[in-house]
Amino acid sequence: MAKYLSVFKIVPPPTRSPEFDTPWRPVEWSEDNKNEMLRKLKEFQLSTPDVSQLRILLHGPIGAGKSSFINSVNTVLQGRNTTAALADSAAGGESHSFTVKFKYHRLKKDGPGSFYPFVFTDIMGLEQSSGVHTEDVKNILDGHIKNGYTFNSAGPIEEENSYYNSSPSLKDRVHCLVSVLPAHKISISSDEVIYKMKEVRQKARDLGIPQVTIMTMVDEACPLVKHDLEKIYTSKKIKDKMQECSDRLGVPMNYIYPVKNYYEEVTNDLHLDVLILLAMKDIIMFANDYVEEQIYFTYF
């Protein structure tokens, strides 16, 4: 009996490869591609005098990397280490939002007094029981809140407030909504925060405002990508995280952009720059399309 039993061996299950054979979203990792995307952003101009700058609103949970993404975009555009939005990296930085005021961030272009024709709006983070009030985010989408307003998690802005714009025009509104979620914490993001984000998204949908999602901290979610950022679109883990992000927020996969923000780097990195530029060029085009569509329907 023993001699027959010896024939049978326990075969371990095949190991699942952590990556696909080919990238499922092709990317050209080259200085030429990076410079071409930079050139298009530098040459971009709005075609209407009704709007002088595109307004991009970033929202998401505290610690998601909203302010860091603004700084990272600025670093890519300037070609050097920069700071536009104050970001917090303290150990306890995720207990409360570091951003407390509504602020527009202009990004310098060529010379003194020259700026890109788009601005970022950085706001207080969403929290389970506090943080920015969802009605305030909706008011921002509508253009009702002026630059400099201090958020109050106890309640939204009142119409009597001096920072309330009672008659906003197209130039005051948000032209693209960007949801920001950290890749390594999508699974544990609270249902309440996700619900608040979806509530804001529904308001943006009703206004026809285009929406994208930035998935940050991809290196924290996948060891393969942490070692080599070029593996980002062959990594099965990153695609799984993007699918999870899509399922929880309801955002189509082709509007989700995984990135790594600048954190410890003090000089520009080609791979970080390319991923950030891929997201930015689409954000600007989507926002511009929205403005042109709104103007068309206004006059015709």
Image (cartoon, rainbow, N blue to C red):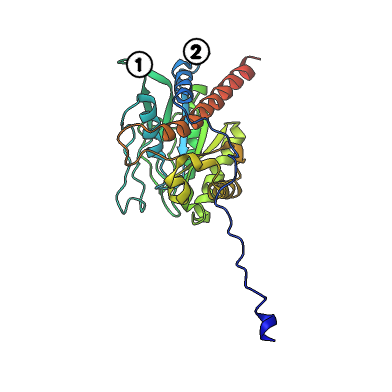
Which secondary structure, mark 2?
Answer: loop
Q: Position of residue 76 (x, y in %)?
A: 39, 28
In-image side of 135 versus 150 (left or right) = right
Residue 44: percent from the left, percent from the top? 48, 17
Q: What residue type is labelled 1?
A: Asp
Q: Which of 261 and 159 is in front in this view?
A: 261
State the image coordinates of residue 113 (x, y, percent, origin top left): 32, 16
Amino acid beneath label 2: Pro
For residue 49, which numbered disc appears in the image? 2
201 shown above or below 111: below
Q: Is residue 227 visible?
A: yes
Q: Above or below — where is 267 with respect to 196?
A: above
How far separated are the C-alphas under marks 1 and 2? 21 Å
Number of residues whose C-alpha sits closer than 10 Å to that of mark 1, classed few (under 14), some (14–19) or many (20 or more): few
* Residue 143 in view here: no
Mark 1, secondary structure of its residue: loop
On residue 204, the disc is: none
Q: Nearer the viewer, mark 1 or mark 2?
A: 1
At 61% from the left and 45% from the top, the residue drawn is: 250
Front-most of 236 and 79? Answer: 236
Mark 1 or mark 2: name the one nearer the start of the chain. 2
In the picture, the quarter occupied by the N terminus is bottom right
**Residue 51: image location, x then y, percent:** 49, 18
Residue furthest to the front in view is: 3
Quarter occupied by residue 5:
bottom right
For label 2, count other residues whose C-alpha is less than 10 Å away and answer few (under 14), some (14-19) or many (20+). few
Residue found at the far bottom of this picture: 1
Which mark, by number, is residue 110? 1
Q: Residue drawn 42% across and 30% down? A: 120
